[in-house]
Structure formats: C-alpha cells, structure tokens
Amino acid sequence: MSDESRPSPADMRPDTRTNTRTAAVIPAAGRGVRLGPGAPKALRALGGTPMLVHAVRAMAASRRVSLVVVVAPPDGAAEVKSLLDAHALPEWTDFLVVPGGETRQESVRLGLDALPDAYDIVLVHDAARPLVPVDTVDAVIDAVRDGAPAVVPALPLADTVKQVEPAQVAGEPEPVVATPERARLRAVQTPQGFDRGTLVRAHGTVTENVTDDASMVEQLGLTVVVVPGHEEAFKVTRPLDLVLAEAVLARRRLNDGF
Ligand SMILES: Nc1ccn([C@@H]2O[C@H](COP(=O)(O)OP(=O)(O)OP(=O)(O)O)[C@@H](O)[C@H]2O)c(=O)n1
Ligand SMILES: C[C@](O)(CO)[C@H](O)COP(=O)(O)O
C-alpha cells in the first residue's frame, strides 16, 4: 500500500472499548549470527517472503494494532521501507521504518523514540518470531488494556533446566550449581506488551544490557504478568528453526487451501 493511501498514525482511531491506541515495535536490526552466513536474519526468506514481512503481518493481523514501527539494520532502513512498500499489508495498519542500533535493547529504544504521541499501549515483537498467531497478540493487548503494566506470553518448559558454573574454556565440563523447580519456570516469547509510560521509563532507567524488555520493567519493581504463549511463536535462531518455520508455513498454506 502506498503512503498516500494510508491514514497518518496521529489520525488513527482509538480502540472504541477502552479508548486506547496500540502500536507494535519490531526490532529487526540483528545480524542473525547463529543462523549462519547470509543477509541480516529479518531479511532472509521464509516461504519465499522475507521473515520481517511475516512478522509485520503477524502484528497487523490484530485489528487493535494501528501502527507498526520496524527497526531496520542500521544501514538498511531504505531497503526495508521499499520491501514493506512492495508487500501487501492490512489497510488498518500504518508503518514507520527507523534505523536500529548495536543491541536489541538499543534498537527497541530507537523504535520507541519514533512513536507518535497518540499511542498508549506498545507491543515489542522480535522480527525473528515471524509466525506468532493473532490470538496470542490479542491476548497480550487485552491483558495490558485490563491494567497490567507489562505482559509476556510464555510456555512451560519441556526440558529440565540446570544452573551451571560456566566453563572458563569452551568445551570443558561445567559443574551443576542448582536445578530450578521446572513447574515454576516459563520460556518467554514476544510480543511483550506494555503500558507506554512504563516501557519508556524502563528504557530510560536500566543501563545494563538485558535480553528482554519485561526484565527492565521487573527492575523498576513493577509486576510483569504472563499469559499463555504459543508453540508457533518460537524464535528463528539456528538453522533447524528455519526448517520448522518452513514446515509450519507449509501446513498453514495447506490448511488455508493455497
Ligand atoms: N542490534 C540488534 C540485535 C537484535 N535485534 C533484533 O532482536 C530480535 C531478537 O534477536 P535475535 O534473535 O537474537 O536476533 P539476532 O541478534 O539477529 O541473532 P544473533 O544473536 O544470532 O546474531 C531479532 O528480531 C533481531 O533482529 C535488533 O533489532 N537489533
Ligand atoms: C525477547 C526474547 O525473544 C524473549 O525470549 C529473547 O530474550 C531475545 O533474546 P536474543 O538473545 O535476542 O535471542
């Protein structure tokens, strides 16, 4: 869709039930080192379409999301903008593209900085989780609209987890320090949802590098709540994840009859 035919973000109609507006920030500036050599991970193809386009569509699949801010590789904003212009996206969603930073945390902050004032709920969603179902997105938004300052989708673990003393030399055996009670552990996914003011405060306060946005809110002393995640919201990190993602996509296309 062209920029001309899109409503401007500031004109977006609020959610009529709660008078809130929801935007999604998609950090997509990572290199994808663990996936192996190639283009930045978000630009690699999944079912013939860049992973990032799947992730944008996954956010825009929710009628409650009226703006998607894509955080592109630092020197790739123009390329990403053209890429999104070339792919069909739902007409109720607008998008912006901004260049990212050296870390995921910095990329999210740059995306937050670009958010127009009108938005009061913010989702942060990894481009590397291209197949999250819309029901999971909506469940996260609903929990924020119901008053939680921070919400994460998560799943119980299939494996027992051991805490170890990390090896000083790669490949050396590592002594086990503890076995946390598995029933109390969850594997956390995205989109993570936030009251905007809370997320902005967290990014303005926490200086150490952390691996997700919700843990920054925990550091503010606020409660983060968990809603059920989904198996298809897995993160494409290593080559085998791409095999699984292609299989999930092929099954969806079969079920949808095309
Ligand atoms: N400087 C960075 C690093 C990561 N990300 C984004 O954060 C998400 C989760 O990160 P991860 O899966 O670790 O992606 P990469 O950093 O690309 O992976 P790797 O660590 O294997 O290089 C991805 O959508 C990635 O593009 C980002 O926007 N900016
Ligand atoms: C945000 C996240 O996807 C939640 O599981 C995860 O922490 C990202 O971690 P990564 O180190 O960027 O892969």
Image: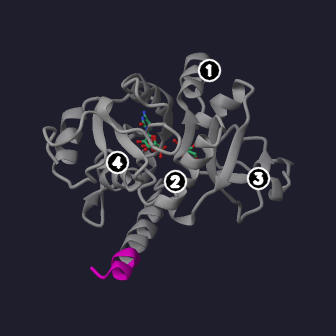
* Residue drawn at the location 32% of the way across and 44% of the way down: 40
Distance between the Cα atoms at labels 3 and 4? 29 Å
Q: Earlier in the sequence, mark 4 or mark 2?
A: 4
Pointer 4 residue Cβ closer than 8 Å to ligand 1: yes
Q: Nearer the viewer, residue 88 or 232?
A: 88
Q: Quadrant location of residue 100?
A: top left
Q: CA distance from mark 3 to mark 1?
A: 24 Å
Kindly report the secondary structure that dominates the magenta region of the rendered protein.
helix
For the residue labelled by badge 2, is the local secondary structure a helix, a strand or a loop? helix
Contact (Cβ within 8 Å) of mark 2 with mark 3: no
Q: Is residue 231 left or right of residue 3?
A: right
Q: Position of residue 228 (x, y in %)?
A: 65, 58
Residue 78 horizontal/vertical position (percent): 19, 34
- Residue 255 lies in the magenta-colored region: yes
Answer above or below: position of 156 versus 96: below
Instruction: Give residue 185's mark.
Output: 3
Q: Which residues are magenta?
A: 251-258
Q: Residues within 10 Å of mark 2 (few under 14, many from 20)?
A: some
Query: What residue is shown with label 2?
Result: 138
Q: Compare marks 2 and 3 and give the one earlier in the sequence.
A: 2
Residue located 66% across and 40% down the image: 169
Q: Is residue 27 left or right of residue 228?
A: left
- Please state which amino acid type lies under the numbered disc 4: Ala
Residue at the image point whose x is 48% and y is 53% from the top? 237
Using the rendered image of the protein, determine whether residue 72 is visible from the camera's viewpoint: no
Task: Say which element carries label 3.
Answer: loop
Q: Looking at the image, is mark 1 or mark 4 earlier in the sequence?
A: 4
